[in-house]
Image: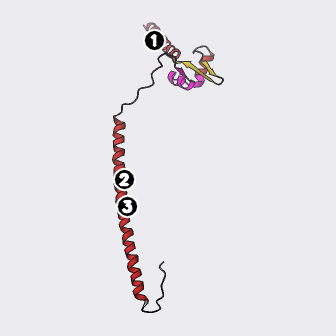
Amino acid sequence: MMARTRIDSRDDIPALMRELADLQGRAIEINSRIARETQTLADTEQRMIAALAKIAQAIAAVPATAPAAPSESGLRILRTAEVARRIGLSKSSLWRMVRDGKFPRPTQLSAHAVGWLESDIEQWLNDRRASDARAEIRTRRRQY
């Protein structure tokens, strides 16, 4: 809200007019600065969008990385969750099979951590596939 200035005499009017002209000049200067800064902001945003588009294109051009290859020595250690995922069973089923001697026992890594050699898991899976194939052949023979 604008404060009202009391005019005591007509002699104060020229001084107030000069003050008004000064305030108007400052307002025009501020508006000009705002317009320049707004344009600078718009230009900066356009440059950011262009840079993001280039980044997105570069990322899209990079081929997807292949799964981690086994270590050179073949001694990669797999933790329980990874083993369960690879064999397609829950962790509790995995531990039940270990207990029953139907799955290789893990190696103790620390006081509270165990793991399996990746080569042991791959061998178990291959043996299982071969066993399933032999069972399939036996089943087919019985049907004939």
Farthest residue, direction bottom: 9
Left or right: residue 91 versus residue 126 is: right
Spot occupied by residue 42 in the image (x, y as percentages of width and height): 35, 56
At 35% across and 64% down in the image, what residue appears?
Answer: 35
Callout 2 environment at 10 Å: few (<14), some (14 to 19), or many (20+)? few
Q: Earlier in the sequence, mark 3 or mark 1?
A: 3
**Quadrant location, the C terminus:** top left
At 37% across and 61% down in the image, what residue appears?
Answer: 37
Membership of 18 in magenta stretch: no
Helix, strand or loop for disc 2: helix
| Residue range of the region highlighted in magenta in the rendering | 67-93
Q: Which mark is residue 133?
A: 1
Q: Earlier in the sequence, mark 1 or mark 2?
A: 2
Please state which of the two labelled residues, at mark 3 or mark 2, is closer to the viewer.
3
Q: Nearer the viewer, residue 99 or 7?
A: 7
Find the distance from the CA under tag 1 to the CA under tag 2: 62 Å
At 42% across and 85% down in the image, what residue appears?
Answer: 15
Residue ID for mark 3: 37
Spot occupied by residue 50 in the image (x, y as percentages of width and height): 33, 47
Residue ID for mark 2: 45
At 44% across and 25% down in the image, what residue appears?
Answer: 67
Q: Which mark is residue 89?
A: none
Please state which of the two labelled residues, at mark 3 or mark 1, is closer to the viewer.
3
